[in-house]
Amino acid sequence: MARLLILSSMVAHGHVGLSAAGPALALLGHSVTALPTVLLSNHPGWPSVAGARVDPDQIRAMIDALEANGWLPSHDAVLVGYLPTTDHVAVAGELIDRVRGLPAPPRVILDPVLGDAPKGLYLPEEVATGLRDSLVPRADVVTPNLFELCWLTGRPVQTLDQTRTAAADFLSRNDLAEVHVTSAPAGPETTGVLHVAEGDARLYPTALRKGVPHGVGDVYAGFVAAGLSPGTALGHLSALIDASLNVPHLRIVEAPAWTRANPLTASEN
């Protein structure tokens, strides 16, 4: 099983960021080292929220301690998620550069948590720009949603063909191994994941649901970081979504049957 180092947000209650990917990966037998960028009581979409960003120097000190104890080289992959400030973007870049220098460098997966339609950017534009210019070129795999792919590339993504073109260009321009576009425009009442690698683009469609709790993108990125194929990752995630519709939080632990879900297959389109 995979050993992952995840730099992202953490909440005390609910499942988003590290608090979504961590328990989901644990149920599949993977281990996670958690480096929180923010510590909150819950997702900020709820009426009350408390907490704060983790000081970037504190994160640096934690990384130093992991290395001093001999644990940094033990990871198979590094997943970078939510980064609230340009200083946190800098920390992520430093972490990637550090693990790249290890004798057996881990894969680097970037989940560019920038925003979503129709709200737009969640972050100040300078943070999003820093992530695009500094971290995307350092990554092996990037997992944007449709809005994020549009923002990162400046290309239209209203149709599946446009999305394929934007993702393929994004992959080649940044010398990436893979791009996973979540919330791809797969047709009426259909969404899914568009997986693009060199010379290959495959759509894994799934039904568009209403009442889906927060955190599904964090879980999917975690699955990708653990080395699951797109079909296997989306099979697990689709079953987890079905078990979590119209409830406040993903039922990661309460409905463990999702861990036994069958993979989804790519469409012929």
Image (tube, helix red, strand yellow):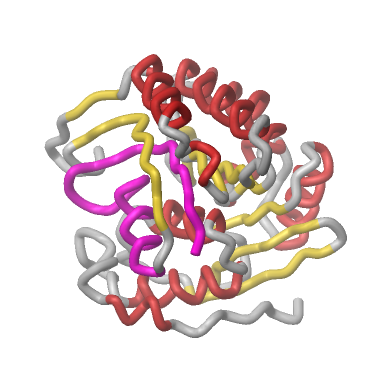
In front here: 236 or 170? 236
**At which x and y percent is residue 66?**
42, 32
Residue 22 in the figure: left or right of residue 80: left
Residue 126 lies within the magenta run: no
* Quarter holding residue 85: top left
> Does residue 122 appear in the picture of this structure?
no
Residue 29 against residue 66 in the figure, above or below: below
* Quarter holding residue 195: bottom right
Which residue, as the protein is rendered here, is positioned at the far left? Answer: 48
Tally of numbered discs: 0
The magenta segment: 1-28
Residue under the image location 40 percent in, 69 percent down: 28
Residue 31 in the figure: left or right of residue 179: left
Residue under the image location 53 percent in, 59 percent down: 226
In front here: 63 or 246? 63
> Does residue 134 appear in the picture of this structure?
yes
**At which x and y percent is residue 134?**
65, 24
**At which x and y percent is residue 268?**
75, 81
Residue 50 against residue 217 in the figure, above or below: above
Residue 26 lies within the magenta run: yes
Residue under the image location 48 percent in, 49 percent down: 4
Residue under the image location 57 percent in, 66 percent down: 228
- Quadrant where the C terminus sits is bottom right
**At which x and y percent is residue 235?**
50, 76
Residue 71 in the figure: left or right of residue 174: left
